[in-house]
Image (tube, rainbow, N blue to C red):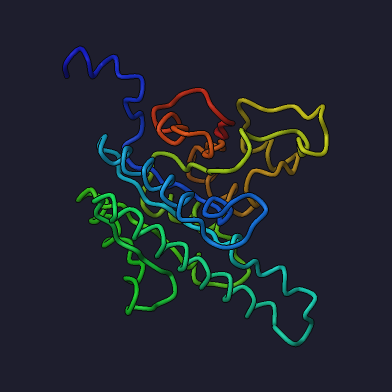
């Protein structure tokens, strides 16, 4: 390794990363739908990451398009399980948009879904996904786990364990985990580091409890950070002290 590389401030710390992107990342704040500008911003950061030799899988949400909870008042008209399947299908729309944005930047990609739809995407197969990562392709994972009543956070934790990632990055619109919602409580404290037990004990809004438990069992570190700040995904992968790190 040459001297310049050893002093590269963005030199990756992690070899294989699973990045969880909420649906909100694909749209403008407070608005529904997909923003091409926001999607391209994600794609540019992802491209810089893989150009540094990092293997990157991205789990996408769909809150910008549809949330299953919005149908909860529908009673027996739309069943809760159906609403969850609708949300899973909506993640594929974001996945397709991100795939084309990445390929417009000459990135090799694969879109894999937990719900089979071979016309537009590959089915998620762990060994195939791993092989794509090893070949330097960005793998976009849509469709959650393919099961209702499971969040995309849990899907991200599950995929991170399956793919033996070095870290799970939880990209959000805030700069870490707080003791209370900072937009409501101006005295809320931001944590630099937390243990899994602290998150579970205090019911902190990091990810859902099932996702935290999955990561705890595998000793999978979770970094919660604000990806809307340009370059933060690269800083996160380089191991910079940003956001909140959840670990043992």
The residue most toward the bottom is 77
Residue 186: which quarter of the image?
Answer: top right
Residue shown at 24% from the left, 56% from the top? 132
Report whether 23 appears left or right of 159.
Answer: right
Report whether 201 appears left or right of 96.
Answer: right
Toward the viewer: 161 or 104?
Answer: 104
Residue shown at 41% from the left, 49% from the top? 40
Residue shown at 61% from the left, 42% from the top? 173
Q: Position of residue 28 (x, y in %)?
A: 59, 51
The residue most toward the left is 2
In the rendered image of this protein, does residue 77 appear above or below residue 221? below
Report whether 154 appears left or right of 141.
Answer: right
In the rendered image of this protein, does residue 205 appear above or below residue 85? above
Q: Position of residue 246 (x, y in %)?
A: 57, 34
Q: Position of residue 194 (x, y in %)?
A: 63, 31
In the rendered image of this protein, does residue 68 appear above or below residue 136? below
Q: Position of residue 227 (x, y in %)?
A: 52, 39
Residue shown at 63% from the left, 80% from the top? 82
Toward the viewer: 40 or 135?
Answer: 40
Report whether 161 appears left or right of 111.
Answer: right
């Amino acid at each position: 390794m040459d001297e310049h590389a050893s002093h590269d401030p963005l030199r990756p710390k992690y070899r294989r990363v699973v990045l969880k992107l909420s649906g909100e990342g694909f749209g403008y704040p407070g608005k529904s739908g997909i923003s091409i500008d926001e999607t391209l911003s994600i794609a540019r950061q992802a491209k810089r990451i893989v150009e540094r030799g990092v293997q990157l899988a991205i789990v996408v949400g769909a809150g910008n398009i549809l949330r299953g909870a919005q149908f909860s008042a529908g009673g027996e008209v739309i069943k809760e399980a159906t609403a969850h399947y609708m949300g899973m299908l909506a993640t594929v729309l974001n996945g397709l948009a991100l795939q084309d944005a990445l390929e417009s930047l000459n990135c090799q990609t694969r879109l894999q879904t937990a719900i089979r739809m071979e016309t537009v995407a590959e089915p998620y197969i762990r060994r195939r996904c791993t092989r794509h990562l090893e070949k330097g392709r960005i793998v976009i994972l849509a469709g959650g786990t393919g099961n209702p009543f499971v969040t995309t956070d849990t899907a991200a934790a599950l995929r991170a364990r399956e793919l033996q990632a070095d870290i799970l990055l939880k990209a959000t619109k805030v700069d870490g985990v707080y003791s209370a919602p900072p937009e409501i409580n101006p005295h809320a404290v931001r944590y630099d580091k937390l243990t899994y037990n602290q998150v579970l004990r205090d019911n902190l809004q990091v990810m859902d409890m099932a996702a935290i438990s999955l990561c705890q069992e595998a000793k999978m570190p979770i970094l919660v950070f604000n990806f809307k700040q340009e370059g933060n995904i690269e800083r996160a992968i380089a191991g910079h002290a940003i956001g909140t790190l959840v670990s043992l």
